[in-house]
């Protein structure tokens, strides 16, 4: 499976250490009609997206600044003293992020003195959770923004028209099945990825910018084949121009892990962008 198809969602590590968009795709009751020109359809689909890579994107640097007050909101009600103590510690944290030309995010952080072993262990969880969350977000973001959802087509390609939508399917290495629904503007409405280990579904929403389709939100579901707690997330993305290219500036994420709901708000500050 190519890296770009591995939609790593928010993992529960960060959420546990800290204490929606909905949608569905309906198909008209019409028989699928195979496209007579699948390569032509794919060429049009690729051209519909903003595609940072084709615009010279090389690297994006920023500081990820979580809104800890929002993320610890429940603790403020149940444990005010602990909430204030946690805010004082978290205010000292700094997370620096570099997203390379392939969408791989590298996260570094400072070290904060902890008053006791329990707090030190909690900080270790926060460090790891932030790394996993940001890495997962950019792995989901990359196929829609640095590339296009149709950049790395595998074998056994099928392109069909179903009412007002296209259905595009193919197979990748490792018996990974990719199944995409897109509207007539080629905006993906649903992407399903199925592997021997897990099934994932993402339903993105785009803004039609002058340069093409720009990702502004998505809802995603992730379920391992082995017994595991299902994960569902909804992400709102605010974009900003940096060096003339649109990149994320703020994230608003809600995660449902089993019956647990968590909310994360984060700004990307001190941003800079490098072009090829």
Image (cartoon, rainbow, N blue to C red):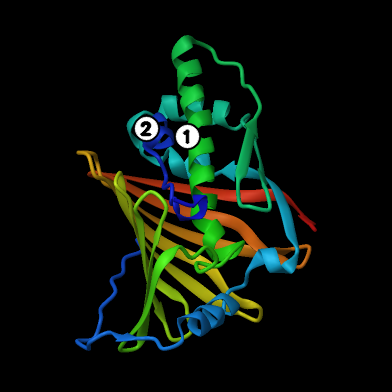
Disc 2 crowd rating (10 Å Cα; few below 14, some 14-19, many 20+) is: some
Identify the residue position indicated by label 1 in the image. 129
Looking at the rendering, in which quadrant would you find the C terminus? bottom right
Q: From mark 2 to mark 1, how far is it between C-alphas?
A: 9 Å
Q: Is residue 139 above or below residue 57?
A: above
Q: Is residue 31 above or below residue 11?
A: below
Q: Position of residue 32 (x, y in %)?
A: 27, 84
SS for dot 2: helix
- Residue drawn at x 26%, y 46% is 230
Identify the residue position indicated by label 2 in the image. 16
Q: Position of residue 272 (x, y in %)?
A: 76, 52
Cβ–Cβ below 8 Å for labels 2 and 1? yes
Asked whether, in this view, residue 148 is left or right of residue 263, the answer is right
| Mark earlier in primary sequence (2, 1) | 2
- Residue drawn at x 55%, y 51% is 138
Comparing 123 with 83, the one in front is: 123
Asked whether, in this view, residue 140 is left or right of residue 242, the answer is left
Comparing 66 with 180, the one in front is: 180
Q: Position of residue 57 (x, y in %)?
A: 72, 60
- Residue drawn at x 50%, y 23% is 124
Any part of residue 94 in sight? no
């Amino acid at each position: 499976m190519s890296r770009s198809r591995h939609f790593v969602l928010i993992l529960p590590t960060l959420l546990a250490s800290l204490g929606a968009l909905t949608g569905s795709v309906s198909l008209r009751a019409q028989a699928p009609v195979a496209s007579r020109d699948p390569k032509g359809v794919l060429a049009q689909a690729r051209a519909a997206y903003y595609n940072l890579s084709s615009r010279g994107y090389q690297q994006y640097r920023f500081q990820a600044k979580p809104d800890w007050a929002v993320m610890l909101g429940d603790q403020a009600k149940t444990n005010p003293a602990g909430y204030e103590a946690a805010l004082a510690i978290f205010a000292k944290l700094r997370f620096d992020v570099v997203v390379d030309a392939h969408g791989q995010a590298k996260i570094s952080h400072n070290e904060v003195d902890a008053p006791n072993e329990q707090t030190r262990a909690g900080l270790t969880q926060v460090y790891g959770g932030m790394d996993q969350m940001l890495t997962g977000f950019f792995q989901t973001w990359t196929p829609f923004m640095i590339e296009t959802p149709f950049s790395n087509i595998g074998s056994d390609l099928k392109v069909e028209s179903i009412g007002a939508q296209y259905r595009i399917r193919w197979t990748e290495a490792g018996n990974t099945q990719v199944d995409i629904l897109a509207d007539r503007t080629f905006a993906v409405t649903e992407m399903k990825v199925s592997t021997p280990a897990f099934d994932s579904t993402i339903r993105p929403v785009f803004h039609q910018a002058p340069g093409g389709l720009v990702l502004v939100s998505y809802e995603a579901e992730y379920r391992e084949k082995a017994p595991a707690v299902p994960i569902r997330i909804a992400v709102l993305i605010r974009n900003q121009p940096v060096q003339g290219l649109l990149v994320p500036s703020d994230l608003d994420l809600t995660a449902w892990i089993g019956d647990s709901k968590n909310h994360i708000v984060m700004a990307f500050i001190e941003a800079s962008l490098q072009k090829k």
